[in-house]
Amino acid sequence: MKKIFLLTCFVLLITTACNRDFDQPNPNNPTIASFWKSESDAVKGINAVYSTFHRTATLYSRFLFFHGMLRSDEGYGSGGDITLNNIMSFNQTNFNESLTAGTWQNLFIGVFRANQVIAYVPGIDMDETLKNRILGEAKFLRGLFYFNLTLYFGRPPLVLQPSEATDRPSNATNAEAWAQVEKDLMEAAPLLPLSYTGDDLGRATRGAALGLLGKTYMQQNKYQQAATTLAWFITGEGKGLYTLRANYRDNFTASTENNSESVFEIQFRFNPNESTDDDVDETRINNTGTSIAQFYAPRGVGFSDGAARRWLVGEFEKENTAQGARDPRLAATLLFDSTDVRGPEFTMIYGQTFASRYGTTGGESSTVWFRKQLNDSEPGRTEEGFRSPNNHRLLRYADILLMYAEALNGTGQTAQAYPYVDMVRARAGLPALSQTNPGMTQAQFLTQIKHERITELTGETWRFADLQRWGDLGPELAVRDPEFTNFVKGKNEWYPIPQSDIDLNPNLTQNPGY
């Protein structure tokens, strides 16, 4: 679905609209009353909801990578952005910083857009199958926006109708917010198709809704509900729809997007003529790519604003393949002095050896960078930029298998969980867990799952969510991430709600500890 970025300024129906003086309205722009009339309007409307993903840096263009990776123990702010470094190390005093407040605001822009589709598309005279699909997409997307709001802010207000300037919603409880995510995804799933073709490839599918629903249950430790939901992929209607790619690296390159392992991807497209990230600025050309590669790329190539913790390398090196080789996922996941197992003289960093760029002692010779968002494997690539076309694989089948195994273990079915971990390990060439560690207890198996999720999913934005749901966030993580010495339990699990929103809405209250 590299193609659904089409958007007209009808998205003026959102908050900031088209950056013009509203005392002098443009008579050529549509209004709510005039817009929602045709099938074409419905398609444009749902496309605008997807467009929220890459509008500004605050969501999947950049900041959601920071929230999920750098705020966890797998990464840290490594560059000169002091605000980023402070917030990622749990030292935030300005509750209106764009890094957090911007994410909150743009997630609600996505909610607002989805609400319009849900409210107005039912009244359009159009093909019923397409209408239902669009409504399913809107509910999935609203569920995803609220998933992130609930994960990172804990107590967002539930705004489920097109909002008005006079609305003053109160915080939901964390349980109420998760319940709304569940509801949206359960209602979305039966309305969505199993797959798409052509220009619609990449839109939300039934599998995407059920995969995210399973993850929603996992975040709440609702293991039985998660197992029941995720069984759709294993023994239900979704059996056989998804397969693990033989080449693990295929999941992270632009040339192998939307493949058989992908359950849902955030779609990006290179647009060399772009001049803005604001998708409602009708005077300029929108950037439909992602800028994260520029900010994660090693110094000398990109800004190196975010890097990976070195302890991750050791986690991959705990086990060799059945043939005695290093886990191949390490080289696909991280760039460091020994991405090539032969060392820095052979490890290539955008056309130059690691040793020639960073030396072998001191300085950045021990730095580790996340690789999955980068384009370094493209022939001749020597730099990154702000328009990367590389899709973000938000949900992969491997993640589904590991969640299903964890859910089975959580319901006391540890023996039945082994095969699904073994499927993931087999792709990496590792021996079967049922051979190397048979008969584990429930607690031992959970510990193993935590390891498996590191080696399979590092650098894919899920680490903070995993630590949160396991109850593992706390100062004790400082042994491998010194920034966690600043972590205050009961506070830093969530970000502060933007103070500007609280100032405007007396019904909103701040999160605990802020």
Image (cartoon, helix red, strand yellow):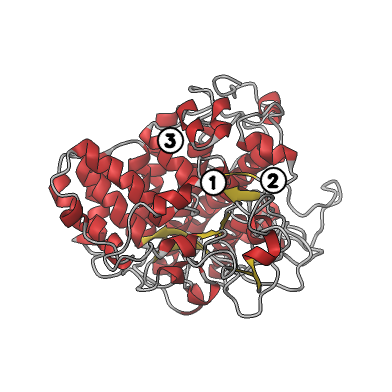
Residue 252 visible in image:
yes
In the picture of the structure, the residue carrying the numbered disc 3 is 468
Tell me which numbered mark, 2 or 1, is placed earlier along the sequence: 2
Is residue 228 or residue 448 the one in the foreground? Answer: 448
Crowding at label 1, few (<14), some or many (≥20) Cα neighbours within 10 Å?
A: many
Q: What amino acid type should be assigned to the residue bearing mark 2?
A: Thr
Tell me which numbered mark, 3 or 2, is placed earlier along the sequence: 2
Q: Given this view, does label 2 or label 1 mark the residue nearer the observer?
A: 1
As measured in the structure, the alpha-carbon distance from the residue carrying label 2 to the one carrying label 1 is 39 Å
- Kindly check if marks 2 and 1 are in contact, taking CB atoms under 8 A apart as contact: no
Is residue 493 or residue 54 the one in the foreground? Answer: 493
138 left or right of 49 in image: left
As drawn, 71 above or below 133: above
Rendering coords of residue 390 (x, y %): 57, 68
Q: What amino acid type should be assigned to the residue bearing mark 1?
A: Arg
Q: Secondary structure at mark 1?
A: loop
Is residue 53 or residue 187 the one in the foreground? Answer: 53
> In percent of the image, x 86 and y 51: which residue is there?
24
> In percent of the image, x 68 and y 55: which residue is there?
295
As drawn, 488 above or below 219: above
As drawn, 56 above or below 199: above
In the picture of the structure, the residue carrying the numbered disc 2 is 15
